[in-house]
Amino acid sequence: MPKITYIEQNGKEHVVDAPVGQTVMEAAIKHGVPGIDADCGGACACATCHVYVDPDWAAKTGEASSMEQSMLDFANDVEDTSRLSCQIKVTDDLDGLIVRLPRSQH
Amino acid sequence: MNTAEINRVIIIGAGQAGGETAQRLRQGGFEGDITLIGEEPIAPYQRPPLSKKYLAGEYGQDRLMLRPPEVYAHENVALLTNTRAVWVDRANKRVRLEGGRELAYDALVLATGARPRVLKLAGADLAGSYVLRTIADIDAIRHDFKSGARLVVVGAGYIGLEAAAVARQLELDVTVVESAVRPLARVTSPDVAGFFLDEHTAQGVRFVLSAQPAVIKGVEHVTGVRLADGAEIAADLVIAGIGVTPETTLASHSGLVVEDGVVTDRACRSSDPAIFAIGDCARRPMIHYGERMARLESVHNAVEGAKIVAATLLGQKPPAEEAPWFWSDQYDLKFQIAGLFQGYDRAIQRGSMEKRAFAMFYYKAGRLIAVDAVNRPGEYLGAKLLIQTGRSVAPDILADETRPMKEIVAAAKD
C-alpha cells in the first residue's frame, strides 16, 4: 500500500498507509492526522483539506482542475503547489508522497 | 457552567454532529468520560453520500465512516450502538436507556437528528416503498434499484433529485411527483429550480408537478402509484423524499423548550444550562441573519454545532460562525449553496445557464444574503466569505463576468 507523509506546521510528521483509489484527504482523516478538516467529507464543497504538495512530487500529483483552482483562490496562504487533498487520488505512483499542512484551514 | 466540574459528557445521537463532538472534545484535551449513544448498529458515518455515491454503488460502507470504528475505543469514547435513550432526568442529571440502565452526566449533548417523513397513504408500508436516511435504507433500496426498474420519487427536494439523478445514471425509468409547482421550491428561487427541472428532463426524468400521491398500489410489493387526480403511474419502487421531522421526543418529554427543534442560544445551549442541542434536531440564532432562529439540516450545521459545544465544554472561545453552506451533486452538476436565501428581494445572475456554469446571488434590502452556484465553486466560496465577514458587493459588480471573483471579494468593503 502506498505510504504518504503529512508534515504539520510544527514539523511533526505522520506517515500513513493510503489505500489506492481513495484520496489523500481520506487517508489523513482515517489516521487522525491533525490539520486537515475536510468538513464536507470530500465533495469539493468546503476547501478545508488544503495541502502543499512537496515540489518534487508536484508533477506526479498533477495540476488542480479549474474547479479546484477556483476553490483554492479562497483558501488561506495558497502557494504554487497548493491542492485540495480530496481531489488527489492515491495511486501506486504516489508511494512516498510528501505533503505539508497549512497553518489553518479556516 | 464551570468547565472544571465537567467530568462526564453524554452525547445522544451518533450521527455526524454527535461523532464530531466526541472527536473534538478528545482532540481538545478533554480527559473525562464521553459516552456516545446511537440507535443505529454502526459508528458515526457521513449521510450526504447516501443519496449520491453510496446509492450509485461507487462507495462502500467503509468510505462513509466518519472515522474508523476502532478509533472510539482507542480514544476511550464509550460508543453504545443499537442503543436508545428513553428519558432524561434533568433534576438528577441522568439519562435512562431502553432496558433501564441509567447513566449520569455533567453535560448532555442532544444530537438526535431527524427522521424522514413517511407517506401517510394506503400501501406506503408495501415492500418496495422506501425512505432515504440511513445506510440500512439504501441497502434495502438497492434490492429494487436495478436498470430498467420503474422508480417513482415522491418529492423534488435535494434528496429526491439526487436519487433521481443516480437512478438515471443506472438506467432506471424515473418519474418525480411533486406537490409544489416546481422542484426545489423550499430551497431555491424559481429560475434555479427551472434550470434543474430542465436538466433532469433532458436526462429523461418525467415530472408530475402540483400533484399529490393518493395510494401506493400493490399486493405484497409496490406496482404503482395512484395520484389524487386519478392518474396512475406504474412503479417497481417508490422513494419518498418529502423532508424530515426533527427528532425531539426526548427533549420534549424532558421539558426542554422545543419549537420545531430544540431551541438553543448561540452556544447551542438549550433551556437547561447543562443540556446542549446540535445538528438537525436543534434551532439556534443565525448571527449573520439578525439572530433569526433557524433549524438547518446540513453537514455545516452538524460540524459547527460540534465545534461550538466542544469549545464551550473545554472552556475555550468558540469558532466564528460560518455562513450556512450546503451542496448537492446531480449528474455532472456541482450545486453549492451558501447563506440563507429566504426573504430575498433581488436575484442577480453571473455566468450562463446554457453553459451549465452560473451563480445566482440573492440580495435583501441591498445586501448579499445567499448564493446558489452551479459548477462555479469560486462564486460559491467568494460569496460565502463575503456573507460571513459581513461584507456586501453591489449587484452590478457581481454580474460583471470580466471581473474575477477573487478580485471582487478582495475589493469588497464592509
Image (cartoon, rainbow, N blue to C red):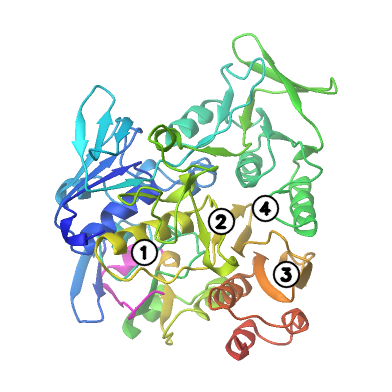
Q: Which mark's residue is nearer the viewer, 1 or 3?
A: 3
Residue wearing tag 3:
B364
Is residue B411 rendered to the left or right of residue B254? Answer: right
Tag 3: residue type?
Answer: Lys
The secondary structure that dominates the magenta segment is loop
- Magenta stretch bounds: A89-106
Q: Residue at x 51, y 53 (%)?
A: B298
Residue wearing tag 2:
B293
Residue wearing tag 1:
A25
User: What chain letter is assigned to the residue under label 3?
Assistant: B
Q: Mark 1 and 3 residues: CB-CB less than 8 Å, in contact?
A: no
Question: Which secondary structure, mark 2?
Answer: strand
Is residue B86 rendered to the left or right of residue B401? Answer: left
Q: Position of residue B197 (x, y in %)?
A: 77, 49
Is residue B63 rendered to the left or right of residue B155? Answer: left
Question: Which secondary structure, mark 4?
Answer: loop
Residue wearing tag 4:
B187
Tag 2: residue type?
Answer: Met
- How much space separates mark 4 and mark 2, taking CA atoms? 17 Å
Q: Earlier in the sequence, mark 4 or mark 2?
A: 4
For label 1, the crowd category at 10 Å Cα-Cα, with few meaning under 14, some 14 to 19 and many 20 or more, is many
Question: Are labels 1 and 4 on one chain?
Answer: no
